[in-house]
Image (spheres, helix red, strand yellow):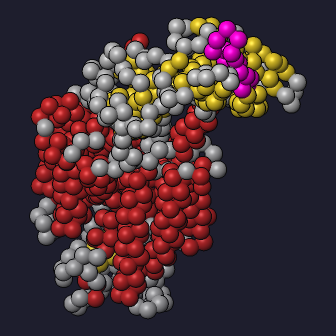
Amino acid sequence: MHTGSPHARAPLAVLALVAAVAALLLGGAGPASAHSGLTGSDPADGSVLASPPPHVTLTFTETVGLSADSVRVLSPDNERVNPRPAHHADGRGNTGRVELADGLAQGTYTVAWRVVSADGHPISGAFVFSVGRPSETAAEVPDTAAGDTAAGRLHGVFRHVAYSGLALLAGAAAFVLLCWPGAGALRPVRRLLAAGWAALAVSTAALLLLRGPYETGGPLTAALDPALLGQTLTGRAGGALVVRFLLLGATAVLLLRLARRAGDPDGRAEEWCPGRRVRWTAAGLAAGLALTWAAAEHAAAGIQVPLAVPASVLHLLAMGVWLGGLATLAAVLGGRGAGGPAVPARAVGRFSTLAFAAVAVLVGTGLYQSWRQVGSWEALTTTSFGRILLIKTAAVVLMLWAASFSRRLAARVLDPAGTAGATSADTGAGRMREPALAVAGTAAAGPGPAPGAPSAGAKAGPPAPGGAEGQRRRLRRTVAAEAALGVLVLTATTVLTGTQPGRAAVRSAEAAAARGPQVRVVTVPFDTGAAGHRGTVQITLAPGRVGENSVEAVVFTEDGGLAAVPEIRLNLTQTDLDIGPIDAKLTDRKGYWAAYDLRLPVPGEWNAAVTVRTGDIDQATVRAPVPVTGRPK
C-alpha cells in the first residue's frame, strides 16, 4: 500500500491495475506449456482389418512416460492380448507400442491407454479396431478422466496446500527480511512462517506418496506400494519432490537462526537488521523451492524450456511475495494484546513497493506465458483453461479494488495530520522519528502521546474521519479482504496447473480434426440371382482423404462367414465434378482383395461401384456413397 499523496498514487494504481489484469488475463498464474494429446494410432480407430496386426502403435503430440499398464489391448471377451508392456517405438519418445499375441480371433478389440505427458499430468483414452469384421460385443473400459480417481483428487488437494505453503513461507520471509525485520519477533508472523513451512513439508510428503497411483490410476492403497514408490523416486516429478524436501530442511535451519536473532516471542528485543548474506541465502532457497515446480511440470515441456523455467520460477516467487506478504501484513495489523509493538510506516511503505515490484514481475512473466498457454483470445471462452483463467482474473480485479481502499486508509491512519513526510529531531540522538501504526490500537492505551503523534509544538492537522481507531479497524478489514481473495486466486492457480492450457486444447482439437475419420467403412448387400450367391461386401477406405489411400474389400456370406470370390472390382466416380470412374485395381490377397495406391484428387462425396463375381457368369454390381475429406492443414 502506497502512503504518499493520493494524487501521486493514482497513476501508479491505475497502471498496476491494468498491468496485473493484462498479465493474468493473458498469461495465467500457472507455468506454461501443454498436456500431451493423441494424434494417431496404427491400427486406426474404427478400422476393420482382414488379418490381425502384429502390434498396436500410438503417437502423441509430446513425449510421454510409459508404465507396465500404459497400453492394454483387450479382446471382445475382455481378455488382455498384449503379453508384454508398452515401449517407445523406434526410440521415439512421443510413441507407445505393444506387441500382440499370435492368432487373434475375429471381432472388435479395445485399446485402453494411460500415459504421463511431459508436464507430469496423466492422460488416458480408448479406441477400437476389428479383425475380420466387427463383433457384437467389445471390452468395456472406464470413461472417467485420467485424474478422476481418489488418489487424483487427493493429489489435487495437496497441490493446493503446497502452493499455499509456498506463498505463506515466501511472503512472510520477504516481509521480515525486506520490510520489517522486527516482525520476525511477533507471534503471528512466526506462526505464519511455521504454518507455511509445515504445509509445504506435509504436502510434499503426501504428493510423493500419491504420485504413483495418480500416474497409473491405481487405488489409494497403492500409495504404500514400495515398488510404485521406488518408480516415483526415479522419475522427474519424484526427484523434484525429494529435492524440495532437502531444501525445506535447509530452510528450517535458516528460520531457526533468524528466530534467535530476531528476539524473544514478545518482541521486546532490540530490532536487528539481517545482513546481505542472510537475504541472498533466503532468496536462493526460495528460488530453489519454486524450481521444484517449474522443473517437473508445465514449464519443463514444450518449446523454449530454458526460458520458460526461469520465467515460471519468477512467476511463482512473485505470487508468493504478493499474496503471502499480504497475509503477513494482515496478521500484524490484526494482532492483539496491549503493549504490542507498533507497525512502522516505513514497513507498510516498503511492502507497498515490494508488492508493486511483484506485480511488475507478474506482468513480464505473464505476457510471455500468454504466448505459450492461451494462444488466442478465443481460447479464453472456448477452453476450460480460459474460463478458469477468467474467474481468477475477476478475483485479482477485486483484490486490486480492495487494495485501493487500503492505500487510502493507510494514508489517513499513518499520516492523520498530513505530515507523514515531516520528521522531528530525536532529542540527543540525532535520529528521525517515523509515524507508526499500533498493532492493537496501543496508541490510545495509557497516558502519553500516540506512537505516531507529532512532537510538542507541531501544528496539529485535522483528525482523520471517524477517528484514528476506526480507521485502523477499517484498514485491518480491507487488508483481510485482500488476503481472503488471495485464497481464491491460489485455488484458481492450482486448478489451472492441472488443466490443459488453451493453446494445447486448441492444438489437440486441431489434431483430432486433422485425423478426422481415419477410415471409411462401407458395407453393401449384393445378390447375383443364383442360389446361395447372396451376401455383403465390406469396403474399407483408409484414411478416406484426398491423396493416397488403401482399399480392402472383404466378402461375407449370407450367414456372416467369410467368402472367397473369383473377382471384385471397385470404381469410384465424383459425379458433381465429372471425375472418374477411377479403377481401384484390387488384387486377390488370399481371403480379401486390396489395393494400397488408390489416389483420390478432390474431396466430396464419391460414388463407389462394386462388382462382385461369385461364379463364371454370376455377378452383381452394387453402389454406395463414400465421403472423402480434404487434406489436413
Residue 16's place in the image compared with 574, above or below, is below
Q: Main secondary structure of the magenta part?
A: strand
Q: Nearer the viewer, residue 201 or 539?
A: 539
Q: Is residue 416 above or below residue 208?
A: below
Residue 538 seen anywhere in this rendered image of the structure: no
- Of 28 and 232, nearer the camera is 232
Image quadrant where one finds the C terminus:
top right
Where is residue 32 shown, x and y percent of the image? 47, 40
Q: Reply above or below: 44 against 30.
A: above
- Please state the horizontal and vertical placement of residue 338, each as a whole percent of the image: 18, 82
Residue 230 can be seen, yes or no: yes
Residue sitting farthest toward the front? 531
330 with respect to 505 (left or right): left
Q: Residue at x 42, y 60 (%)?
A: 489
Corner quadrant of residue 437: bottom left
Residue 195 against residue 527 in the figure, above or below: below
Q: Quadrant of the N terminus?
A: bottom left
